[in-house]
Image (spheres, rainbow, N blue to C red):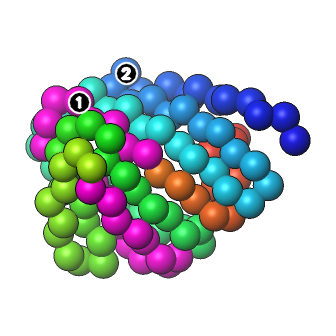
């Protein structure tokens, strides 16, 4: 499989940069809309996820629990667990790893 990088502009203030293999996907999420007034809508998926905060500060909501996170912090999300974020700083860069890959991100 060729290493291809996919850039997707989701909105004026959110961009994803994706690279993946057969069983693992890494997604760089760049937010420039902070601080958010409200958290994103909670979601869940069947993928394991690890999130690393590369820049900025966020609140990470997971299964009803709020985690304040800053640059260098990481969190793991098991499949089926509701989660979302709220940016606390103007710009935030998250690095998400998923297994298996998020096929919905490739559409």
* Disc nearest the viewer among 2 and 1: 1
Q: Quadrant of residue 5?
A: top right
Can you identify the residue that label 1 sits on?
Answer: 91
On whether residue 11 falls in the magenta region, the answer is no
Q: Provide the secondary structure element on which disc 1 rests.
A: loop
Where is residue 87? Give x, y as percent.
Answer: 20, 44
Q: Mark 2 or mark 1, which has the lower sequence index?
A: 2
Q: Quadrant of residue 43?
A: bottom left
**Is 41 left, or right, of 10 in this rendering?**
left
Residue 7 seen in render: yes
In the image, residue 87 above or below residue 11: below
Q: Which residues are magenta?
A: 73-95
Q: Provide the secondary structure element on which disc 2 rests.
A: loop
Can you identify the residue that label 2 sits on?
Answer: 12
Q: Residue at x 20, y 76 (%)?
A: 65
For disc 1, the neighbor class at 10 Å (few under 14, some 14 to 19, many from 20) is some
The quarter of the picture where the N terminus appears is: top right
Where is residue 18? Give x, y as percent.
Answer: 60, 37
Where is residue 39? Give x, y as percent.
Answer: 22, 53
Q: Residue at x 38, y 32 (%)?
A: 30
In the image, residue 69 above or below residue 100: above
């Amino acid at each position: 499989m060729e290493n291809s990088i996919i850039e997707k502009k989701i909105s004026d203030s959110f961009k994803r940069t994706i690279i993946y293999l057969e069983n693992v996907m890494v997604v760089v999420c760049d937010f420039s809309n902070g601080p958010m007034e409200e958290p994103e809508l909670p979601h869940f998926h069947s993928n394991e996820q690890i999130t690393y905060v590369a820049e900025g500060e966020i609140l990470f909501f997971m299964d009803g629990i709020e985690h304040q996170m800053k640059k260098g912090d990481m969190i793991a999300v098991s499949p089926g667990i509701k989660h979302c974020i709220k940016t606390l700083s103007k710009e935030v860069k998250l690095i998400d790893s998923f297994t298996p890959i998020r096929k919905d991100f490739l559409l």
